[in-house]
Each structure stands twice: as C-alpha cells, then as structure tokens.
Amino acid sequence: MSTDPRAFDGVNVLDFTQGIAGPHATMLLAQHGANVIKVEPPEGDWGRGLGAVYGDQCAHSIAFNRGKRSLAMDMKNPDAQGVARRIAEKADVIVEAFRPGVMAKFGLGYEQVREFNPDVIYLSVTGFGQQGPYSNRPVTDAVIQAYSGLMTVNRDKDGLPQRLNMIPVDVITGLYGFQALSTALMRKFRFGGGCYIDNNLMQSAAAFQAAKIMEFHLEKGPSQPLYVPVGTMETTDGFINITAMREAHYRTLCDVMGKPEWKDDPRFDSREKRLENEAVLMPMIREVFATRSTADWAAALTEAGLMNAPVQTYGDLMANEHVRAVEAIAWVEHAQTGTVPMPHIPGQPRIDGPGPFTRAPAIGEHGAAILGEWGYSDAEIAGFRASGAVAGGESAVAAE
C-alpha cells in the first residue's frame, strides 16, 4: 500500500449517513485520507441490506463504505448524543442524511453545531432538500428518476418510461456532495470558515440532466436525437451499439453494411434528412444487422474506424483484454465475501491491495477504539453499552 500523503489526511469527518448517496460522498473523502467515523444504528446502516447479504455486508455497503470506521450508536439515547457532540466539537466535516429537523432533535443541527464549532462544514443529504412543499417526503432513486424526467428519455420498445436498473441518482448525488465538500474544505484551508451545504437527489438529478432540460425548453418539448443512426442493434447472437455521428461516419457505415446506394438516397443524404426520416432509416439498418453475428459486425465496424461496442455483461467487462491490460479493476480479498472486484475511480489513489482503504467496517467494529480516542474510559464505554447507547465495538471481521 502506498505511503504517500493523501489530500485529506488529518481531516475529521463525522458521518451520519445511510444508504448510498451520503456514504458515497464520505467514502470518497476517506479514499483521500480523511478520518471518517461512520455513525450507524445498532442494527446497522440500512444500506447493508441492499441485494444479497454476506454477513453484515452487501456489494453496495462494501463499495460505498470502504475506508471508514464504524461506531454503532442509538442516536435517540442521550448518552449517544453526548458522544456525538464531543466528536462534533472537533469535526471538520459533518454529513447527515436524516429528514429535515431530525439532527436538531439530537442537538446536532447545523445552527446548534456552529455555536460550538463555527468553522464546521456541514452537508445534509435528502430527497428534495431542506425547504419547499416536498422537503419531508421520503424518496428512492427510482422515485427521483420518475420525478426528474429521467425516465422519459429511457423508454422500452412500447414507449413505456423505464427506470435505469441501478442507482444513478444516488451515485451522482454522492459525487456532487463530494465535489461540494472538497471545494468547501479548500476554501476553509485557504480562507477559514465553514458552511452549510444542501445536497439532495432532486437537485442532483436536475443538474445531471441540465442539457436535456434546456433542450426541452428550447424545442418546446422532447428533443430530437443528436444524430442518426445511433442505437443498439440486434444481431444473430446478441446486440451491438453503433454511433455514426458525422456525415463521413454514415457513408462509411453504408459501405460496411453493403448498402452504398443509401449514401445518396435523397431521404438520408444529410443529417437533417436522417433525423426527419429516422423512423424509415433505422428499421432498414436493423434489418441488415440482424443477418450477421455480433463479432462479425464488431470486427467490420472497428476495421472501418466506426465507433461501436458489443453489449457486454459485467462478466464480459471484467474479462475484457483492454480492462485487464490497463488494470481498470482491482481484485481485493474481503473476509465476508472472498475476493471481490473494485473498479479504480478516476482521480482517486489507486487500489494496490487489501488494506484500510479497501475494507468496509463491520457494524460498530471500531466503537471501543473511537471512544477511547475521544477520551472515554473503559468504565464509561461499559456504561454506554449497558445503557444501549453504543453497540458492537469489538471487530467482527479480522483485520485484512
């Protein structure tokens, strides 16, 4: 493991988030060296139960919590609130994902914290933000995909709007949160002072779709494709995606398909005409692609210099020669799952083997160590356990 200093070495982060969006933001801080204390309920972050579960982990909890330490506390317990306040007094960053007003009930709302820690950077993650008529509504990634218009640009062959079958809005919200925290930390380091950041899925989904929203306004409705032909074609044994952005690309594609006469067909001989006659041209192209295998088309298109990619599974991706050649995915041993793939994140320190930056903590794994670091005696820690304020604290997973 590299011993080079990381950008956020020495930065203390108190993380009250669960699920994906908030944990993603704080995981990225941890990968840059921040000391991230993950405060989660005694039963664990609900994000640990997304999909197949391995012990107290799942793929999502490992991916979005690696590099952190866990302190399991019942935040409704006054003792737990006292512990959290002590840590908050020295925190550079606090991140929470409760509904608006919940942290204030714990005595840890932004206005309360800034009274004793005026330079704190405080980020809240919610579905719709801190204000407005929807601010208290619960949401999921799929709900925001529908609400934000994202589903309208992802329709099935019958025109039914569909969700992207993963969690793009949560992940993007985490990225925007990390961006906001990083710039706030830079401002704090240079000029001093903290700030409050309202990070929410609704605004993140809108920002992610800024160009599409602008197009909708300018075109008075759903926008036309950027160019034609583009799309996924069915072959004799699978699917391949093609993109012919420019005039030269279209003309070359016609030659590859064995349809040179389409190049000067008056219905298709310009970008504007191809857009106008998309409903005619695309079925013609699909009919041609259905006559050969994916590998045949990929070879022919690539040789001609045309952009294309067979539709791969994740297994295909991991086995791909280019992915393996550039070591885009690291393979790391995890005690509860065995060896797992971890894609390298652009701009982040590379994964160079198992260690603190690849491990995701067990529930409350670091409780005793964290409490000791913050000045609590063994007797006090035992008292917290007895009162139900703190759970766990002894490692449930051997150090890797």
Image (cartoon, rainbow, N blue to C red):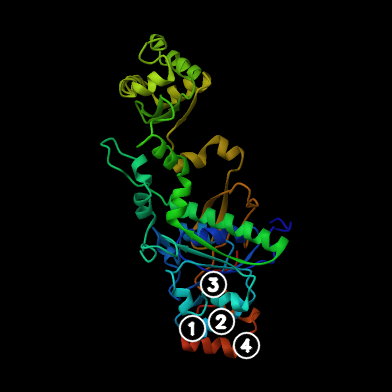
Q: In the displayed structure, does residue 283 sit left or right of residue 298?
A: left
Disc on the earlier residue, 2 or 4:
2
Marks 2/4: CA–CA distance: 12 Å
Foreground residue, 34 or 186?
A: 186
In the picture of the structure, the residue carrying the numbered disc 4 is 377
User: For the N terminus, which image quadrant?
Assistant: bottom right
> In the rendered image, which residue does mark 1 sit on?
389
Point out residue 360 in the picture as x, y percentages from the top left corner.
Answer: 54, 63
Residue density around tag 1, few if under 14, some if 14–19, many if 20 or more, within 10 Å: many
Question: What kind of element bears circle 3?
Answer: helix
Label 1 sits on a secondary structure element that is: loop
What's the CA distance linking mark 4 and mark 1?
Answer: 15 Å
Question: Which tag is nearer the camera, tag 3 or tag 1?
Answer: 3
* Of the image marks 3 and 1, the number of the one nearer the N terminus: 3
> Whole-Å distance between the Cαs marked 2 and 3?
17 Å
Mark 2 highlights which residue?
83
Q: Nearer the viewer, mark 3 or mark 4?
A: 3
Query: How many C-alpha atoms fall within 10 Å of the one at disc 3: few (<14), some, or many (≥20)?
Result: many
Decide: marks 2, 1 in contact (CB < 8 A)?
A: yes
Across and down, in percent, residue 336 comes to 49, 63
Provide the residue designation for mark 3.
110
In depth, the one of 174 and 204 nearer the eye is 204
Q: Earlier in the sequence, mark 2 or mark 1?
A: 2
